[in-house]
Amino acid sequence: MLRNGEKYSSQIKFHVLKLIVCLSFILLLSSCSYNNTSNNQLYEKNIITMDTPMDLKAYGPNAQKAVDESVKKLYQLNDMASTTVNSSDIMKINNASGKNYVKVHPEIIKMINLSQKYSKISNKWDITVGPLVNLWGIGTDKARLPSDSEIKSKLPLVGYDKIKVDEKNKSVMLTQPGMALDLGGIAKGFAADEVLKIYKKYNIKNGFIDLGSSSIYAVGKNESNSPWGIGIKNPRGDDMLGTVKLSNEGLSTSGDYERYFIKNGKRYHHILDPSTGYPVDNGVMSVTVIVDNNISDSNTIADIMSLLVFELGPKDGVNLVNKMPGISCEVTTKDTKIYTSSKFKDKFSDLNKNFKMAN
């Protein structure tokens, strides 16, 4: 338990990025709705998995099949990528660190390969931060401020180059004992891409995939035949920072308000710098990234890039995104300024009066 004036924000904190769409709904643990009042049939289902409330919408005659199959896939992915399910592939890899290779599902191999690819871009994002994540415990009832010596003792266990992948045998090994993978920054984006594949399989032209603020994909148009409107969360309030309109695009937001605790007036959040072992402290409060549908693995890339840009900071993060076709972003800083890439400006509207554009 947290003491001495510490405040805790739970892992499933519902005031993260939420949708502003034509339909309003209440998230339930497990619910579904079916609307057959028009030629464009709607089927919707709400679940909780990956420690996240999720909402799936699909329109069309195959909507129910698409959503139900997607739900099964989401549960399967949770079972293979979770760090709390002992039988998951990730836990098997972590438990065998420094010992031997572990045969895993091809989806895990793909997530690891993509992670390593983007880690090489900046050395600022790394899925081997598992030992540090476990040490801090942010997002659990064991959250605490570790000592400098504790943090330094874990740093040698961090490094994406210490992951060995045997493509032929679909096996993975962590080369040092005590290493641990954490796919929290990629798993939901990857899951959204898998749901999108199922939607395409059933010819879903319009729908909405909301796997929590860390991964959202707008399929086609909403029931009013307009782009889907999404509200970007104010990182220091219950209102919105602004809105974006999306159609066949993926969106991810990362922020210091999602999982954190406060001790002695300082906020300690879950986005850790793999080089220091401490939460990133560069003045950034939140980052939103949008990826076009012509980019392969668009949702996965959106998830990774939102964290990578968060760690790079407003200047270097925006500069990087401006060099990447099909990707745009905004960065919100503690001095209430909003930095945007060149392509994001045209998507962004309804700016909160308490914030100002920096460029």
Image: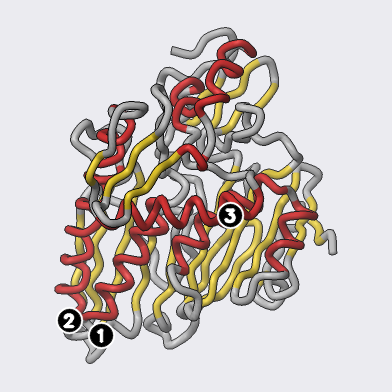
Task: Out of 21 and 129, give the one closest to the viewer.
Answer: 129
Secondary-structure class at tag 1: loop
Residue at 35 percent of width and 29 percent of height: 97
Colour pattern of the rendering: secondary structure
Residue at mark 1: 203
Residue at 64 percent of width and 69 percent of height: 328
Mark sitting on residue 269? none
| Residue 226 x, y percent position in the rendering | 48, 85
Residue at mark 3: 306
**Residue 84: quadrant of the picture:** top left
| Residue 120 x, y percent position in the rendering | 60, 51
Mark 2 and 1 residues: CB-CB less than 8 Å, in contact?
A: yes
Gap between marks 2 and 1 measured at Cα: 8 Å
Q: Outermost residue, bottom direction?
A: 39
Residue density around tag 2, few if under 14, some if 14–19, many if 20 or more, within 10 Å = some
Secondary-structure class at tag 3: helix
Mark 2 and 3 residues: CB-CB less than 8 Å, in contact?
A: no
| Residue 326 x, y percent position in the rendering | 59, 76
Q: Quadrant of the C terminus?
A: bottom right
Disc 1 marks which amino acid?
Asn
Residue at 52 percent of width and 66 percent of height: 230
Mark sitting on residue 62? 2
Secondary-structure class at tag 2: loop
Disc 2 marks which amino acid?
Asn
Gap between marks 2 and 3 measured at Cα: 33 Å
Residue density around tag 1, few if under 14, some if 14–19, many if 20 or more, within 10 Å = some
**Which of pointers 2 and 1 indicates the residue nearer the eye?**
1
Residue density around tag 3, few if under 14, some if 14–19, many if 20 or more, within 10 Å = many
Placement of 296 over or under 277, stated as above or below: below
Which sits earlier in the primary sequence, circle 2 or circle 3?
2
